[in-house]
Image (cartoon, rainbow, N blue to C red):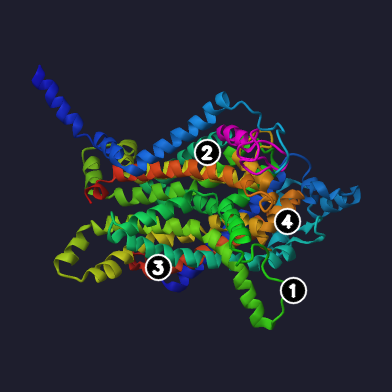
Amino acid sequence: MTTVENSQDIIQSQSPWREAIRAFRQSWAGMLGIIILIAVILFTFAGPLFYPVDPFEIVWAPLTPPGESERAPLGTDYLGRDILAGLINGGPATLFVGLVAGIITITIGILVGAFAGFYRGIVDEFLMRVTEFFQVLPALLFAMVLVTLFTPTIYVVSLAIGIVSWPTTARLTRAEFLRIRNLEYVNAARSIGARNRRIIWRVILPNALAPLIVAATLTVGIAILFEAGLSFLGLGDPNVFSWGLMIGSGREYILDGWWVVTFPGFMIFLTVLGFSLVGDGLNDAFNPKLRER
Amino acid sequence: MTMTLLVARRLLHAFLLILAVLVLNFLLIHMAPGDPADVIAGEMGGATEEMLADIRKTYGLDKPVYVQLGVYLSRALQGDLGQSFFYNAPVLDLVVSRAGPTILLVATALLFAIFVGTFLGVLASHKPKGIVSGLVTLVSVIGYSAPIFWTGMMLVILFAWIYPIFPIANMYDITKSGGFFGRVVDILYHLVLPSLALGIVYLAQYARLTRASMLEILGSDYIRTARAKGVAEVKVYGHHALRNAVLPVVTIAGLQFGSIISGAVLVETVFSWPGLGTLAFDSILARDYPTILGILFFSSLLVIVANLITDFVYRLVDPRIRTGG
């Protein structure tokens, strides 16, 4: 009995996923990214419990520099609203848009890319024309048009970001599929009679996952940057407090008060940094070639 | 496939893409809530009944949708992108007058990013655990994660307060004279910060990409063979590996042209650079739909042209594409 358990342990410890998790734990980038993300999430979700100030409330004189008033430790914006309260309360909306838009982007991208790269021929031709069409439209301008024509709620903003961002993922997926589809192990799977669906999702996709998982983590970061960009241009959801909104409304006052845009921008930077470091860590963890070095 | 046939095919392809963008514009006008005539006139324009009637007549808005599409396409292909009621000028004139500064900004930023990025990436791949590699990763990750308009604003704060050596707004100083040469120098001087803000994001990406693909390639068999043959390390990097490692950069740079234009919209807004981005920003504030759609169309056109160029560069770099299909 003991021997059987032991041999199972050995098999489990050799599985690539376990190896990857172990490698991820050893990657300083990945762990730092996780720590940053946890810190951001704690700050923004648990923050209101410790610092219950309404981000819309005017607490002190407009454009008070950081450290001058106890009521506003990080200063106030052009209306006299507390910047710290804004930082705490602006997080959830930004993270929400980033995650939802990221998921939409990745889903469309993988589906399109996998079918195009696997089936090639007419399917590839058609899907790549569509991808190419979406790719020639400058994403931000397209999203600006979509959001301007329709109401800028956070759902419309997320959807707009997803609709304009997927081509990169599709291209990446397709390239991976094209690279892998003729490799020996795929031919081997085909020769033992595996169906297309199995080859796509069980044989090729797992081998294409390393760059895709990295891309997925980065995509969430990009979506957050995207939301910030739209808000900066005044096209975010005006009813939801977000970091981008703070930058957008403080934009004209940067020479009167550097803190108005610097702090919310730094929060966005930290969050996106967290996601891209995790992406880096995953990249190291999934790529045995890199690991050996 | 002969070269002429190939070029013809690519041009036809580009033309179809242009048509598709126009169809999208048409759909967007009609999908927007409200009367298309109102959309065309712009909500802030305060269009009179007379103007609306005029628009309905010009675009055949009382006719079936496919007739409207036909009218729209034929007008657009003749260069009529509509009239901006906010600026009181034809959209095409507005867009063309603002395209130059945007192209200048984007091209400068892109070239800067490609050359410096590739170089840094190769340097980093040489010693994957070395100091340069760590530094590149650090700079890349920071450049990649910071919102582009925020980087721009930080540059504005830095160069307006702490070291006021570069201009932080506009494209040239109208008070300065000095002839053609003086004007060129002045524009380049104004170009430094915006193109730095725009380029650094892509520089970071290209450095990461080059590093990653170099590392993958350096682990491959043909490199091991080359090394076993005793090929000098410099040649292994410069000749054997870089040629393959640069392919993704070329592909991505070409495909990213649209995203660079998107970045330019933000950077132009920060630095009051008088290009398509500031025009887009102003027309969105004014809800001037014909101008916004005109910019979307024109910038897509720029991307299509850039893609054509990339395609040919790609063929030059990778002979396999030329022979294979």
The local crowd at label 3, few if under 14, some if 14 to 19, many if 20 or more residues have their Cα within 10 Å, is few
Give the letter of the chain under mark 4.
B
Q: Share a chain, discs 4 and 3?
A: yes
Q: Which residue is located at x 67 percent, y 54 percent?
A: A255
Q: Secondary structure at mark 2?
A: helix
Q: Amino acid at mark 1?
A: Thr
Q: Are marks 1 and 2 in contact (CB under 8 Å)?
A: no
Residue A164 in the magenta stretch? The answer is no
Residue situated in front as seen by the camera: A120 or B165: B165
Residue picked out by circle 4: B291
Q: Amino acid at mark 4?
A: Thr
Q: Secondary structure at mark 4?
A: helix
Q: Amino acid at mark 3?
A: Arg
Residue picked out by circle 3: B315
N-terminal label among 4 and 3 = 4
Distance from the alpha carbon under mark 4 to that under mark 2: 29 Å
N-terminal label among 1 and 3 = 1
**Residue B114 pos. (x, y %):** 45, 64
Q: Which mark is residue B175?
A: 1
N-terminal label among 4 and 1 = 1
Is A257 located above or below residue B122 in the figure? above
Q: Which residues lie in the magenta part?
A: A64-92
**Residue B289 pos. (x, y %):** 74, 51
Occupied quadrant, residue A20: top left
Left or right: residue A5 versus residue B110 is: left
Q: Which mark is residue A98?
A: 2
